[in-house]
Amino acid sequence: MENLKVENMTGSNGNDIPNQFIIRTDKGTYFQSYQSIIAFKANDRSIILDRDKWDYSKTTGKYRNQFLGETKKETEAKIKDGTYKLDDLN
């Protein structure tokens, strides 16, 4: 059975952020916003974004940026150049 750990993202003040989750598995780490998986960081450092949800809303974008450690513009460039893959994560 795969190890699985779910935790709320934390804000800069150290408080849990409601509805924003980090899911750690044996294969890598997922970012979930509300009920949707937004992004996956594999252990091999590859990144997969959900093709339909990665840019769903301003709130999702804020926490996706935090998860990836970059701006939306940087994320878009990495999608365009093939660094990040888009797939159905939901």
Image (cartoon, rainbow, N blue to C red):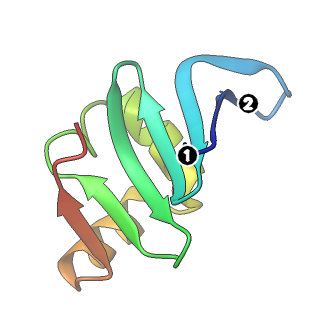
Can you identify the residue that label 1 sits on?
2
On the rendered structure, is 64 left or right of 4? left
**In this rendering, which labeled residue sits more in front, label 1 or label 2?**
1
- The numbered mark, 1 or 2, whose residue comes first in the sequence reads 1
Dot 2 surroundings within 10 Å: few (below 14), some, or many (20 or more)? few
Residue that lies at the very extreme toward the right in this rendered image:
14
Q: How many numbered discs sit on the rendered protein?
A: 2
User: Which of 32/78 is in front?
Assistant: 32
Image quadrant holding the N terminus, namely top right
- Residue 70 at x, y percent in the picture: 53, 63
Q: Residue furthest top?
A: 18
List the residue tagged with mark 2. Answer: 11
Q: Secondary structure at mark 2?
A: loop
Q: CA distance from mark 1 to mark 2?
A: 28 Å
Nearer to us in this view, 47 or 56: 47
Which residue appears farthest toward the bottom when viewing the image? 81
Q: Residues within 10 Å of mark 1 (few under 14, many from 20)?
A: few
Which quadrant does the C terminus fall into? top left
Residue 16 lies, in percent from the top left, at: 73, 20
Identify the amino acid type marked 2. Answer: Gly
For residue 46, above or below residue 39? below
Where residue 66 appears, x then y in whole percent? 58, 48
Which picture quadrant has residue 38?
A: top left
Q: Residue at x 19, y 62 (%)?
A: 86
Residue located at (38% from left, 57% from top): 72
- Which amino acid type is marked by label 1? Glu
